[in-house]
Image (tube, rainbow, N blue to C red):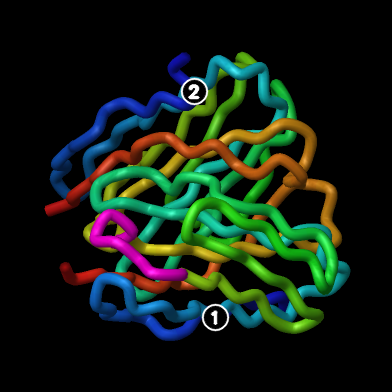
Amino acid sequence: NAGVTQTPKFRVLKTGQSMTLLCAQDMNHEYMYWYRQDPGMGLRLIHYSVGEGTTAKGEVPDGYNVSRLKKQNFLLGLESAAPSQTSVYFCASSASGQIYGYTFGSGTRLTVV
Amino acid sequence: EDQVTQSPEALRLQEGESSSLNCSYTVSGLRGLFWYRQDPGKGPEFLFTLYSAGEEKEKERLKATLTKKESFLHITAPKPEDSATYLCAAHGSSNTGKLIFGQGTTLQVKP
């Protein structure tokens, strides 16, 4: 029972490089989210999706893009990485709305140098 | 603006010393208040959902309560394995499922 799987777990990028973080869930959840977690800032929503083919901006979307071509996958892209994007990124999914809470992945630790 | 604030930021307890963590929220149309536990290097793990003022839920040494302005996570006779960061999150009136998280309380329980 995998739940929510994030790849990669760790990555170091140089400023200006691009990369894609992959989130996959096997629970047939409609809703998926990308958060970043920084010391003292808590979890902040980057982008989210309420269904296949849909995406929307969260609290801190600048510098990121997302795609949800398949229901089970939610991709987070950084087109031109900046040191300010050094963070731990978490993907989460949920069934209809929040009544059942999120299931989180184990996170991706990204360092931009 | 919807907001969730947790206190204290950090808490050190001796094993067996009971205490409470606070989560204050200002959220329009609260639909649910969530508590998560996060261990170092891992994703948050769901603990409880509370839906209305006066509701309480328990799990082992943890009990969560909810009022119209706050939620408390009571830890009774904690053990070292209860050491973790505890996150509180609120779901407001939107239908998008978005949660607003507090900054968390890091609990350390010493033997």
Q: Position of residue B54 (x, y in %)?
A: 82, 72
Q: Name the residue under label 1.
A: B22
Residue type marked 2: Gly
- Can the viewer see residue A61? no
Residue placed at 47% from the left, 14% from the top?
A1
Q: Is mark 2 on a helix, strand or loop?
A: loop
In the image: residue A91, left or right of residue A53: left
Q: Main secondary structure of the magenta part?
A: loop
In the image: residue A66, left or right of residue B41: right
**How many numbered discs, if any?**
2
Q: Which of A111 and B66 is in front in this view?
A: B66
Over which residues does the magenta segment extend? B76-83
Task: Tell me the quarter of the picture where residue B106 sits.
Answer: bottom left
Residue type marked 1: Asn
Mark 2, chain letter? A
Q: Nearer the viewer, mark 1 or mark 2?
A: 1
Q: Position of residue B76 (x, y in %)?
A: 45, 70
Task: Tell me the quarter of the picture where residue B50 sits.
Answer: bottom right
Q: How crowded is mark 2: few (under 14 residues within 10 Å), some or many (20 or more)?
A: some
Q: Name the residue under label 2.
A: A3
Q: Which of A21 and B43 is in front in this view?
A: B43
Q: Residue B105 carries which label?
A: none
Q: Where is residue A104 in the image (x, y as percent from the top left)?
A: 48, 39
Residue placed at 36% from the left, 40% from the top?
A79
Whether B82 is among the magenta residues is: yes
Mark 1, chain letter? B
Q: Is residue B78 above or below residue A50?
A: below
